Amino acid sequence: MSAEENLKKLNISLPKAPDPVGAYVASKNVGNLIFISGQLPLNHEGKLIKGKIGKELTLEQGQESARFCALNLLAQLKKICGSLDKIKGCIKITGYVNSIDTFTDQPKVINGASDLISNIFGEKGKHTRAAVSVNSLPLGAAVEIEGIFEL
């Protein structure tokens, strides 16, 4: 199945690609690679999910936040490509988790994004990644995820 067909099958509708909140571009096409700037967890109502995992937010809420980041990544990708079916594969995602010092499940949080990308793209969605803990993120966001995709 194609990525666009999988979106329909999974009953997923992509949000409007968020505008950058700083002096940068949301995406950049270099050769056959597309770099997507860090995306924040804006939920279905466009509200930013804020907080620190392990304090205000649970692991499960962190995973949901990562999933929203991935939806915004894919919205940016579709905006630049026109269709997710033009994507040859996901190369890498980097996830930043706003978490307390003793929290060590950053990879589990970022699985929320990795699982979504793999479910939509199938084998082409399998990617390399990093899951990094940070002490704060822009606007107080719980998670931020950036990605590199191949056309």
Image (tube, grey):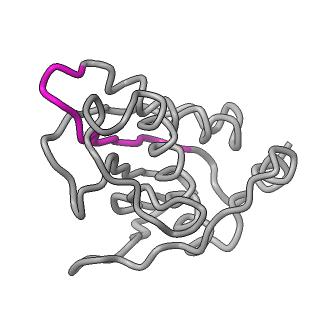
Magenta span of residues: 90-103
- In the drawing, does residue 66 fall left or right of residue 136? right
- Residue 96 point in image, percent of width and height: 28, 42
What is the x, y in percent for residue 11? 82, 51
* Residue found at x 61% / y 39%: 116
Residue at 21% x, 53% y is 137
The quarter of the rendered structure image containing the N terminus is top right
Compared across the picture, whether 114 is left or right of 144 comes to right
Residue sitting farthest toward the front: 56
Across and down, in percent, residue 6 comes to: 81, 46
Note whether 151 is above or below 122 in the view shown: below
Assign the magenta stretch its main secondary structure. Answer: strand
Numbered circles on residues, count: 0
- Relative side of 86 to 99, left or right: right
* 23 vs 96: above or below: below
Q: Residue at x 55, y 64 (%)?
A: 77
**Is 68 included in the stretch rendered in magenta?**
no
Residue 43 rendering spot, x and y as whole percentages: 53, 59
Q: Quadrant of the C terminus?
A: bottom right
**Closest to the observer, 119 or 58:** 58
Residue 37 vs residue 43, the one in the foreground: 43
Q: Nearer the viewer, residue 7 or 134?
A: 134
Residue drawn at x 49%, y 33% is: 127
Q: In terms of image quadrants, where is residue 98?
A: top left
